[in-house]
Image (spheres, grey):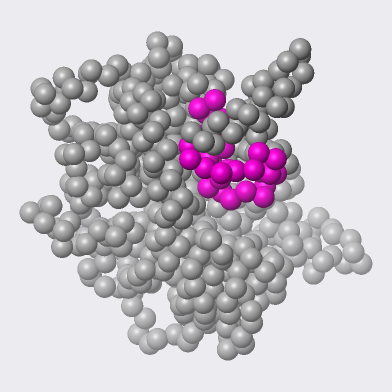
Amino acid sequence: MHQAESPATVASRHENAVTISARDVTKEFGGVKALKGVSVDFYAGEVHALVGENGAGKSTFLGTLAGRVSPTTGSLTAFGHMITGANPRASRAAGIVAIYQELTMIPARTACENVFLGQFPTRLGIVDHSKMRARFEVLCQKFGVHMDADARTDTLSIADQQLLEIMRAYESAAKAVLFDEPTASLGESERARLLDIIRQMKANGTTIAFVSHHLDEVLAVSDRITVFRDGSVVASRPTSAWTKQQIVTEMLGSELKSTLQQRPLRPTQMPRDLLKVSDIAVAGLLYPASFVIRAGEVLGIAGLVGSGRTSLLRALAGLEPATGRLEIDEVEKPAPRTPRAARALGIALIPEDRKGQGLVLSRSSACNVILGDMPSIARFRILREPVIMKAASAAVVNYGFNLNRLSAPARTLSGGNQQKLMLGRWHHARPRVLLADEPTRGIDIGAKTEILAALRKAALEEGLAVVIVSSELEELLVVSDRILIMRDGHMVDTLDCHSDDVDVERILHSAFAVHAASLHTEHA
């Protein structure tokens, strides 16, 4: 239930006009409700923060306001205009600009050109470069930064590219700016600069929606905080009425879960160390981390968006320019710098984006299973269909995959079956270490259970070291033996999932840097 505001608070807030209003907004993806009757108002000259666990619905809701996501039901109005369907152009026409983690700069263009894309100043029908540069300098002065107008955008830091996005929004006379995890990739000084700019925009009367997992900055910059949980708004009140501990309590819900009953059993004897990681690091993303993974163990990695968890997984897979050392089966090697080098070490990755990075959607399911290992099953460099089908069948048969679908293109499969193809591929390749990035994202509950069981089975029966990054904390607790906690690029904690005092609440304490004693005081 929402907590009531005092009459004085309501009166003071309504001195500012409601600029954006959402009423009973729902959104379904393949039968899964991502938003459930969300109603929120935004005001001029106010920073309104939206917080919640990963998957709570806040970014999906922001997408409806930006015109990226079409609501299934409900109504959205912005500055007197109705927003209907997935239409970013209509949202921009209403005065709404969204700034995402994934920036929209054109790398080969200059900093100045990117700010004025679509709105170049002209003279006699020709782009007026001198006027554009002069205006760029004015914007730099306004935001208190120094930047070379002629610098190629791909040579700039993420923070400077993000600033260009804000300049573009300001130049377009945006009346509302939606920030989705804007500080996730920024350092401390860059974060402070961005928050100062947001305060400046607020002072000019701009409506600000601010999604962030960093609760300290939420409390520092916002005027109002709305908490999402499981696709619903569960609390909304002025920032002055919140503490960090209260926010986490609302995110978790009143029924704080204790330990789950389906934890893996503690092994009777300690298995041998399979992979030792020493000081693995990625400049600007991941600080040196060291840990050990044992044969037959499932190691979970938890953390907020931008915490470094995916950077750690990608570094192990050779997808980031990492430094450090790995020791596999007592053989020491430098951290892999390419996916091929990782595979040579026996390290395989199931990527988060299975469609974009894992599968060739136009090829058959069977071909996708043996992808990367075709030379070993080809005879005289010729791949024969019966041989492909036999190899693919053997790889996926234990994962509940319908063998009759092996001839079907991968694009025709459900998300769960596509993920089973990825599992089958690495079963066929026989790695020593299997990395899985968000392995249950976007699949139904039945398939989730099968995928988690398959990963657990791969560890127990085949002796693999399995590493899982997941936003689904309850799933991590069910499948993992230990969980590493990442925060701000650092490995800050290691939790033993066989321990009775490890639960979702404990993970969030570490991820948010909230002290357990403080949170328990809030429950009292």
Task: Determine if residue 520 is in view.
Answer: yes
Residue segment shown in magenta:
143-171
Residue 262 picture quarter: bottom left
In the image, taking residue 125 as reference, residue 242 lies left or right, namely left
Residue drawn 35% across the image and 28% down it? 203
Which of these two is toward me, 266 or 499? 499
Q: Is residue 20 above or below residue 3?
A: above
Residue 46 picture quarter: top left
Residue 461's x, y, as percent?
50, 75
Task: Determine if residue 448 is in view.
Answer: no
Residue drawn 29% across the image and 60% down it? 513
Residue 62's x, y, as percent?
43, 32
Which of these two is toward me, 517 or 392? 517
Which of these two is toward me, 283 or 516? 283
- Which quadrant: the N terminus? top left
Residue 298 picture quarter: bottom left
Q: Is residue 209 above or below residue 336?
A: above
Which of these two is toward me, 9 or 471? 9
Residue 134 within the magenta-colored segment of the rendering: no
- Which quadrant: the C terminus? bottom left
Residue drawn 58% across the image and 56% down it? 351
Residue 360's x, y, as percent?
71, 48
Residue drawn 48% across the image and 33% down it? 142
In the image, taking residue 37 as reference, residue 148 lies left or right, namely right
Residue 437's x, y, as percent?
52, 57
Residue 154 within the magenta-colored segment of the rendering: yes
Q: Is residue 138 above or below residue 348?
A: above
Q: For the view shown, which residue lies furthest in the left direction?
A: 524
